[in-house]
Image: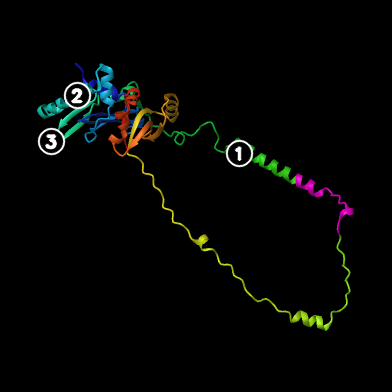
Amino acid sequence: MISVTEHIRYLLTCHECVIVPGWGAFVSQHVGARLSSDGSELLAPTRVLGFNPEVAHNDCMLASSISRREGINYDASVALIANEVSMYFHRVDVLGELVMPRIGKFVKSSNGAMLFEPDEDAPIVAASYRGLPNVAVLPVADVSASQPEENEPEHVLHVDLRRRIVAAAKVAASVAALLGMGVLLSTPVLVDDSSTDFAAVMTSEITAPKSAQTLVREITAPIDSTLVFTLPSTSDSTSLAVKPHVVKEPRCYLVIASCETRRRAEKYIAQSGESGLRILERDGRYRVYIATGNNAEQAARLKMTDADFARRHPDAWVYSR
């Protein structure tokens, strides 16, 4: 018998988001190493699991995984998931809870809402960090002030050897600079007088005085008093208002790979052979995506319409920011 829950557990080990069509989305998040609340332990890194019932569309990842693993076609996988989801709802309505081993438990509250409690004992999302134990942290006591050295006299003055070397180097550099300036100022400079220009008094040139008629003619000559103004061109002073073009970031991305570092993401793009691949850096992960959209259906349109792409990348999934 084909178990959809087993496929969900498998996909949670290598993906951050696994959507069960008609049920909801399991979302995992990485939590780094940290101190405990009382500061006595260094907790190992892990991954925590959450559930979002609002994200229940079909992103083809779960159906493609079942189809590839069980050897059935895609439509049969979709029908199998729908049948399993109906059983999930029936168990919650009748028994009041649904237990998924190593994933968590769904409980129906008093007001009819469905609550998710992740598995705390052996969660599948933290399988990669299972061998890392918590480390006890011991506080560092300051014993230097309470335990003075007995063998050392109180009058001994500690001098940093590095500071003394730096100070001596500065003094040596200053002395060398003063000696260089003294040598430069005391050295005579020879000047070639053959090409030097000297100041001299220029002899005046005596000319005949101008006649009275010439002076009158120069004085009575018409003077052009027209003033010319250059006005700036209106085309230069007119500025066109430029409207800023705001690029709206898409909400959903069709992701084909999720890497821990940018270097691995760039290596994956170089080896994949696909064109149009880009990298999305968010939440400490580097996701390689090929298409975007304002919603999940627009982002997953390439996988649902292009059979060749769906065959090459059956595990492609939609990431929503």
Instruction: Please give the label number shown on residue 112.
Output: 3
Question: Residue flagged by tag 3: what amino acid is it?
Answer: Gly
Residue 196 appears in the figure:
yes
Magenta run includes residue 150: no
Q: In this view, does 178 lie above or below 65?
A: below
Q: Name the residue nearer the viewer: 278 or 119.
A: 278
Residue located beneath label 1 in the image: 163
Question: Residue flagged by tag 2: what amino acid is it?
Answer: Ala
Q: Point out the tag, 2 or 1, that comes first from the N-terminus.
A: 2
Q: Nearer the viewer, mark 2 or mark 3?
A: 2
Residue 300 appears in the figure:
no
Q: Which of marks 2 and 1 is in front?
A: 2
Q: Name the residue nearer the viewer: 47 or 289.
A: 289
Instruction: Please give the label number shown on residue 234.
Output: none
Question: Residue flagged by tag 1: what amino acid is it?
Answer: Arg
Q: In this view, does 130 lie above or below 180?
A: above
Q: Distance between the residues labelled 2 and 3?
A: 27 Å
